[in-house]
Image: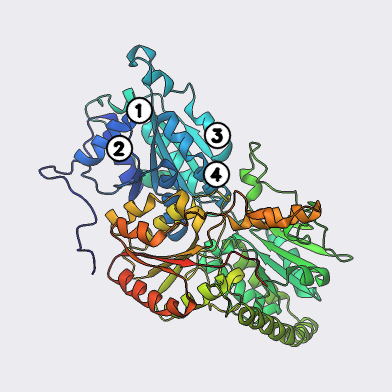
Amino acid sequence: MAIAERPSIEVPVGVHDQAGKPEWGSDLIMDMLRLLDVEYAAVLPGSTFRGIHDSAVNYTVNQRPEFILCNHEMITVSMARGYARVTGKPMAAIVHNVVGLLNTTMTIYDAWCDRVPVLVLGGTGPVNAANRRPWIDWIHTANVQGNFVRGITKWDDQPASVAVIPESLMRAYRIAVTEPAGPVYVCFDVDLQEEALPAGFALPDVGRYRPAPAVHPDPASVTEAARLLVEAETPLCLAGRVGASPAAVRTLVELAELLAMPVVDLGTRWSFPAPHELDFYGMQSVLLREADVVLGLDAQDLEGSMRQPVNYTTRKADAVTVANQKVINVSLDELVHRGQTTDFQPLPAADVPILADSVVTLPLLLEECRRLLNSDARSRIDRRRRALAPRQQDLRERHQAAVARLWDRPEISETRLASELWQAVRDEDYMFTWGRLRRMAPGVAQIPGPERHLGDGGGGAVGATPGMVLGAGLALKSSGKLPVAILGDGETLSSIQVLWTAAHYRIPSLWVINNNHSYYNDENHQQLIAKHRNRPPENKTVAMRMQDPEVDFATIARSFGVHAEGPIKRAEDLPAAYRRAVEAVKEGQLAVVDVWTETREQA
């Protein structure tokens, strides 16, 4: 049965919107968020932003931004990350002083590595020690609270007066959305939030402080890059975060088709259609050994991407290069390097470095390549196109064989899980908000680009993904799309609180839990190191398996009042369970399908 509809925004009874007539510092904060068109703010309540909370419910009557209650601070930032992945716009995450901010650091780091704009806002203080309550105000106040996240945010600030609140928030917004995008943190003293504004306080014209246009490339570098690509015998494109822009992906497809250039999607976003005659995901090392020109597009780790897969016992990866190989690197990443972590990756060698946004670079590069094409180049491209066709066919046959090998198993394989899911949603207006389809079921799903799959990415924080896909579902709530995610059991259990938020705010999504009762990725690591040391690999399951008792996600989900299927233990039960779940999502519910999958090594 469908959950009854209710207004998506709770408007307190007897309260009238007074936005634009601020009386208090916290009213001014809410006005600025509204002027910046911040639609939602995820919160876990805390006394250090009680002024902001009061203004949200009694001044702007919980509208734009609407407060979304979460049950852990890390979920607030994850939600904002997922929302931004869909919309490209920041959502706010408001967290309580030192302790709340410390709880967010894992998911702030995910947003940082993902290059996603998030407005993290917090309260602190009173900074004036004379106004502090004994004990609690002292342990929850930092001298400079932004120090906790300074190495994993683009910018942080703590305004010293109400007069500078507008500038602080406008700067934060502008820095967050300027590419490379990322999280920012602004902290508000409780005394500042509760300070009365002077009469006639004027709000700024935010349009005069809008972000600048995207960074354009040097024309001479574009010409040189186009010349190398047109003259190449075996060019190769390594596509990173291009999929953050559907328009950029469409242009990349035009460029690849013009040049008969193979493309390997590096996975941080869905940056190239699959299937496509030039999609060579899975053949990265082979093609790199042949490539005379490599085009890197928003590759977060271009140097690492041009090496053989790492041997995890020796921790070594050999470079895959050929004589006289030329490298073109289109990236803005060096503009956001920090020293706190080494997420900046190895320094890539590049013959043509282009410090620009791929969104604006790709059309210019396409135009220049077209201009430089001559008869010799066209003949070379035609030969390359003919040579690639049988290799593409061979790749697809290998994908089909891999899926067939993992189809009928004693327990459900993740390949079967993903393949049956694809059959259930392929005719819907779907959007995969998470799920490694290329790895789980290679060649099965037909994904034209980022408008159907948001890709992967992030910093690998355990428990971050459920909140992220919930935020993506929130962004898609009124779009008519069917949000779909494949989640691991370990990461879901880490953030099981998201089910309450999903149920309370009626955020429809289809979540399939790949429940293999284990932190399975680490089992593989344990097996490798045990074999390397001539020790029993059978012990890889110790302190890895979530068994005795097994986690029953379907029962947990039902306890929150959401639609749940399972546990599904037989592959033949998957199609009907998926169909019922899809219908539940169409009725406005979150649907959880708990699929028990194999824990043994796959053949």
Res 592 → quadrant = bottom left
In front of the other: 591 or 196: 591
Q: Of helix, strand and loop, which one carries label 3?
A: helix
> Is 446 situated above or below 121?
below
Mark 2 or mark 1: whose residue is earlier in sequence = 1
Q: Residues within 10 Å of mark 1 (few under 14, many from 20)?
A: some
- Scheme by which the image is coloured: rainbow
Q: Is residue 384 above or below residue 175?
A: below
Q: CA distance from mark 3 to mark 1?
A: 24 Å
Q: Residues within 10 Å of mark 3 (few under 14, many from 20)?
A: some
Which residue bears the numbered disc 4? 109
For the C terminus, the image quarter is bottom right
Residue at image position (80%, 56%) is: 317
Residue 602 locus on image (x, y percent): 65, 70
Q: Earlier in the sequence, mark 2 or mark 3?
A: 3
Determine contact: label 2, label 3, CB under 8 Å: no
- Point out the frontmost of discs 3 and 1: 3
Which residue matches tag 1?
Answer: 163
Q: CA distance from mark 2 to mark 1?
A: 10 Å
Q: Which mark is residue 150?
A: 3
Q: Amino acid at mark 3?
A: Arg
